[in-house]
Amino acid sequence: MDVRQWIVRFSELVTADASRLTRLDSDIGDGDHGTNLDRGLRAAVAALDSDLPPGKVLMTAGRTLVSKTGGASGPLYGTALRRAGKAFGDATEVDAAGLGAALRAALEGIKELGKAEEGDKTMVDALTPAVAAYEGAAGEGLAAATRAALDGAEKGAEATVALQARKGRASYLGPRSVGHLDPGAASTVLLFRALADVAGRS
């Protein structure tokens, strides 16, 4: 699987969905999630050389997101990608086990930085079931595991609608945060849709 294409596809999907992500963030946050993430990912794609190994691709994309993306999404996605890249180490190929370890490292990085757990109404609510679903299907190969991960992310994101936010700006709304899809969980679905798209071509 081409990890660079994963980031490229993620950027394409965020660009196409930036207005919806920003609208979701306007309901319960700063109202800039789509525009910020779109800008950061465009910069990340521009920073990627075509001959970088998987770990370097993710490390470079992560560093760029941190430096070019405003709000919380830059540090969170940047940390996730850098942790994933570090998990790949010097590997030159992506296999199901290696990607699973990278996704688990990304999840742990986000939880560590954001101090969030499942149920807080954050991107962790989509990422956690996605990683668990991937790990459960990893024995079936990359394409099947990434499709399972996408399904987990979609269900996890949808479940945030019923939750009351306990982290971030949305938590200031208290009970009024219930009934809204978390924008970070929504963009996490795009991350896994991009992964399933690219793995499905391999």
Image (cartoon, rainbow, N blue to C red):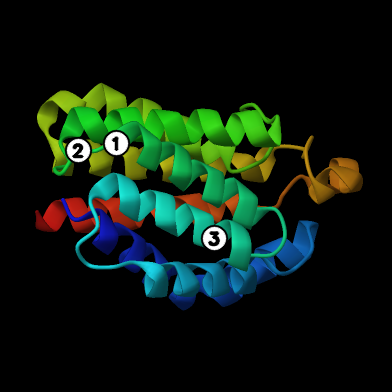
Q: Nearer the viewer, residue 77 or 181?
A: 77
Looking at the rendered structure, the secondary structure element under dot 2 is: loop
To which quarter of the image does residue 55 belong? top left
Residue 99 position in % (x across, y down): 26, 36
Residue 79 position in % (x across, y down): 54, 44
> Would you say the residues marked 2 and 1 are in contact, meaning their CB atoms lie under 8 Å apart?
yes
Which residue occupies 54% across, 51% down? 78
Above or below for 157 versus 134: below
Disc 3: which residue: 65
Mark 1 is on which residue type? Answer: Phe
Q: Please indicate whether residue 147 sits to the left or right of residue 48 in the image.
A: left
- Mark 1, residues whose alpha carbon is within 10 Å: few (<14), some, or many (≥20)? many
Which residue occupies 65% across, 41% down? 122
The CA span between labels 2 and 1 is 6 Å
Q: Nearer the viewer, residue 138 or 6?
A: 6
Decide if residue 46 is in sight here: yes
Disc 1: which residue: 88
Q: Please indicate whether residue 138 sits to the left or right of residue 35 in the image.
A: left
Above or below for 33 versus 86: below
To which quarter of the image does residue 164 belong? top right
Q: Please indicate whether residue 183 sits to the left or right of residue 11 in the image.
A: right
Which label's residue is closer to the chain start, 3 or 1?
3
Mark 3 is on which residue type? Answer: Leu
Which residue occupies 62% across, 41% down? 160
Disc 2: which residue: 91
Mark 2 is on which residue type? Answer: Ala
